[in-house]
Image (cartoon, rainbow, N blue to C red):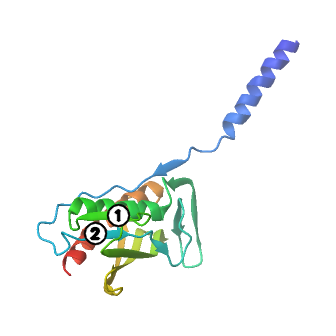
Amino acid sequence: MTITKYIAFIIITIGILGCTKEPALKVYSLNTPSVNAVQNSSYKSKSIKVTYPKSLKDEVSQKMHFSYSSIDSGNYQNSEWSNNMSKLLQGTFIEVLDESKLFKVVLFDTSTVREDYRLESNIFAFEHRVRGDLSHAIVSIQFNLISIETGSMVQSKRFTYAEATPTIDAKGYVAATNVAVSKLSQDLLKWLKSN
């Protein structure tokens, strides 16, 4: 009888633990957009340092932010970014600029090498915005190109995108965010090349 009670206890315990297990955490990353190398650039012999993007509103972390209104927002509990969002964006910008060959060399902000230009960025919005039946990945980032030689701003521009999500969940948000970041990357290169 003791063995039967022991087996029953183990079966009930496994059943309870199986029912109370949290859903697995899904981790997502940004896809680095592919870009074409720029043929003619006034920056070909120059270096650029890409600074760590700063957020003007929300704390930037691995958490995926969503909102249903200006006062109703939160973070996904079972989905997150693979790294701090500022790190992911900084890495994406560096990789895109490096692939484009717009500059001779592209540096992280931690590099001790003296740069010719610095690219600063401010994140105004980076979230999944749901309003009724509408669901969008919102990306709004301002870039400032600074000349180190003169210490002055060469140019500044804010890019804003609202990409419809294929589904109203974290997976759909990530898919739409990757589309927005791809567009942002192309527009960033055009903007930098135009100066």
- Which of these two is toward me, 113 or 52? 113
What is the distance, in whole Å, between disc 2 and disc 1 at their CAs?
7 Å
Expressed as whole percent of the image width and height from the top left, the position of residue 66 reads: 52, 67
The front one of 127 and 106 is 106
The residue sitting at 34% across, 87% down in the picture is 152
Q: How many marks?
A: 2
In the displayed structure, would residue 3 be above or below residue 115? above
> Where does the C terminus fall, quadrant-wise?
bottom left
The amino acid type found where label 1 is placed reads Leu
Where does the image place residue 96, in percent across and percent down from the top left? Answer: 28, 62
Query: Which residue: 44% across, 64% down?
Result: 110
* Residue at point 35%, 70% (across, down): 114
Q: Residue at x 27, y 63 (%)?
A: 105
Image quadrant in which you'd find residue 192: bottom left
| Label 1 element class | strand
- Element type where label 2 sits in the image: strand
Q: Position of residue 189 (x, y in %)?
A: 24, 71
Residue bearing mark 1: 107
Label 2: few (<14), some (14–19) or many (≥20) C-alpha neighbours in 10 Å? some
Residue receiving disc 2: 47
Q: Using the image as rendered, state which of residue 14 and residue 124 is in the foreground.
A: 124
Residue 67, label in figure: none
Three-letter amino acid code of the residue under disc 2: Ser
The quarter holding residue 13 reads top right
Left or right: residue 115 compared with residue 127: left
Residues at circles 2 and 1 in contact by the CB criterion of under 8 Å: yes
- Determine if residue 92 is in view: yes
